[in-house]
Amino acid sequence: MVHAPTLTPTPEAPSPGPERRSRRRRHRGEDLTKILFVAPAALAMLALFGYPIVKNLMMSLQDYGLRTFFTGEAPWVGLRNYSAVVQDQLFSQAMVNTALFTIGSIAFQFTVGLALALFFRRKFPLGGLLRSLLLLPWLLPLIVSSATWRSILEQDSGILNRSLTWLGVIDDPVPWLNSPSVALIAVIAVNIWIGIPFNVTLLYSGLSEIPDELYEAGQLDGATGWQAFRYITWPNLRAVASVLLVLGVVYTIKVLDIILGLTGGGPANATQTLATQSYERSFIDFKFGEGAALSNILIAISLVFAVLYLRGTRRAVDE
Amino acid sequence: MIGNRIATALAGTTALSLVLAGCGDSGGEGGGSSSSSQNVSSLTVLDYYNNDPDKALVQKGLDTCATQLGITIQRETVPGDTLIAKVLQQASSKTLPDVLMLDNPDVQQIAATGALAPLNDMGLTGDGVIQGMNDATSYQGKLYGLAPVTNTIALFYNTQMLQEAGVQPPKTWDELKAAAKKLTKPGRYGIAFNANATYEGSWQFLPAMWTNGGDETDLNSPQVAEALQLWVDLVKSGSASKSVINWTQGDAKDQFVAGKAAMMVNGPWQIPALAKAPNVKWDVVTFPLNKPDQTPVAPLGGEAWTVPLNKDQAKQQKAADFVKCLNSDENELAWAKARFTIPTKTALLDQYVKEVPSMKAFTEQVKTARARTGKLGDKWPEAAKVIYQAIALALTGKATPQDAFKQASGG
């Protein structure tokens, strides 16, 4: 708003009545214009973000069930929904799974993404084509990806186990989605595959912004290979990387469709996360109040990372 | 910009609430206009037969009744798994259809909310309908829906494979286990079924559980554990794939059609798909018994037609007449024959089997079948959840069949 051009003349010489009135009118008109400019965005924010969040908060404090839709009655229950979901026998497991899922996904998405981005920085024939092919996982609808991976990971006839057996890597087929001890790893692996394009794209553009002169200067000082990465690439990439990591956490922590498509939270609840639990409570058990409570816990966790992101970027701007 | 990104992220995490907010809006007045009180000329219908051939076959029956009553119908079909969400949304915006189809285990739950009109008051009865179905569609002594046709599950077997292996269709669990083992060879399992962690997985478990005398009111009984032991034995011995915990009934059918399973637990709605693979020769027997003196008890499937409460009395009565017509003997038989389902009126069963011999085993099963909501009513979903979670725990080796039910119910 500092740079907004002002049309008002300097308020010095006391001017006669009519002129002052017109100035006030002009002031008022200007205010109105400002409000009109902000209004559409404000309304959209209120309707699309404000209302659902408030509604979700209210719902989490109500006994909001199947009956509510027909009678409109949703008695207040205070924090009972929250205590019910936290005391549930699956809650701690869902928390641990959510953490493992998020950390595992992000760590590998990022490192593999970084390695690929560095690789594609080199100029080689078909490099551009290969890089765009890498975007494919991103372009597929998630339901399609998860259905495809489900058949790839199928224990008996899935192509992965068949190939591994044929290559002699394994003797017995691995129960990718059928064993509680392996399923989470398989689900994380699929999510890594889906997340790599996003990481490569952002890191690649971050890398492109590092001036070549820096590397040339570094070369003169003997910084090549690993040293060049450590002292030139990484410090210049840090801003992009921190944004990427925080966004990654916020996006990954709420992943639902991939897990539902692959395992539905099973086997034996081995891949239940807060998101799948929230979905299950709302849309299978029709306990919308408890579902809302769980999703609010998720929102709170995401919010912590969103604040971290805000502070990180503000510092970057200050620098 | 920054604000926008955060907002986007938040929007993602609140995706659920967005959906709910859409449902939560209550607006609009009344279901149906009350001006057209006397001469009702059209009814709205909602069902989940959204795929052919079922979609067209059901349409035929609806059209016949519409012509008989001298009305037109506006039919909407939605995918099966979205029906309840659709009904909830319509309920809160007061736009429920005049005639609503519901899967039979959902009828009591919806009736409990007070959304449906009792059919007894409008001249409809469940007389002559198999007891199990009346149990499912009644709530607190009143009838809320009528199902023209029903279905259930039984044991399909590949006649060729059994012949080659010299195996008779199993009648007891011991025979089932032995047969499944004998029929298993590299690239082929003896039996396929669905033991996934959904209501479908519980439904497939019920023939074993109920036939053995197990009951959903006491899931910690030895009879229930014995039934689960059967599933565990079949998987542990390698006669069934470990993937059964992720399979749907459709997956089991695919395995059977592909020759990767010699037997499967499944329902008659798979018959049209089986007919498309003429090289697979199959037959059906009732689900095997644990002890020879038991009678097979299978769960009743099929959908009931209900009438949501309507301010317009004339329209509500017309809708009830429409449901009555759908449940006429002629329509029951027509739908049963065309869609490989079974009439719900006991008097029609013998005639039906005479005309469609391939449905003999299923019709036998239906005579003694029970409804899932027969005993627990709208509390059934909770028991079903314990059942499918216990199955998952036992099949993945995380608990013995005895402990699985205790663990799953949080005990």
Image (cartoon, coloured by chain):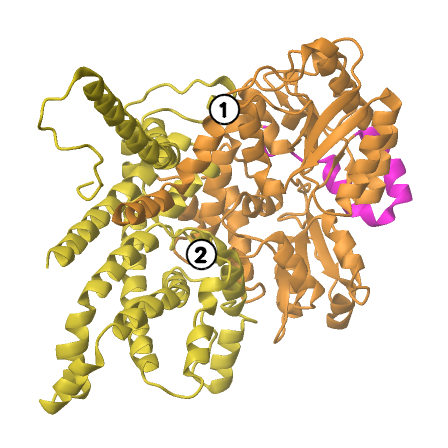
Q: Nearer the viewer, residue B220 or A198?
A: A198
Residue where numbered disc 2 is placed? A258
C-beta proximity under 8 Å, tags 1 and 2:
no
Q: Which chain is yellow?
A: A
The image shows residue A163, relative to residue A195, as above or below, that is below
Q: Determine whether B286 is above or below B39 in the image.
A: below
Q: Is residue A58 left or right of residue B293?
A: left
- Find the distance from the CA under tag 1 to the CA under tag 2: 29 Å
Mark 1 and mark 2, same subunit? yes
Give the SS element for disc 2.
helix
Q: Residue A233 location, x and y as percent?
A: 19, 76
Label 1: which residue? A69
Residue B374 is situated, as x and y percent measured from the top left of the image, at 60, 28
**Chain in orange on the image:** B
Q: Residue at x 19, y 20 (%)?
A: A20
Which residue shows up at 75% across the image and 42% down it? Answer: B55
Instruction: Give the residue type that dot 1 points to.
Output: Phe
Task: Give amino acid for label 2.
Answer: Ile
Magenta range is B345-374
| Residue positioned 46% across, 19% down in the render | A72
User: Residue B183 colored magenta?
Assistant: no
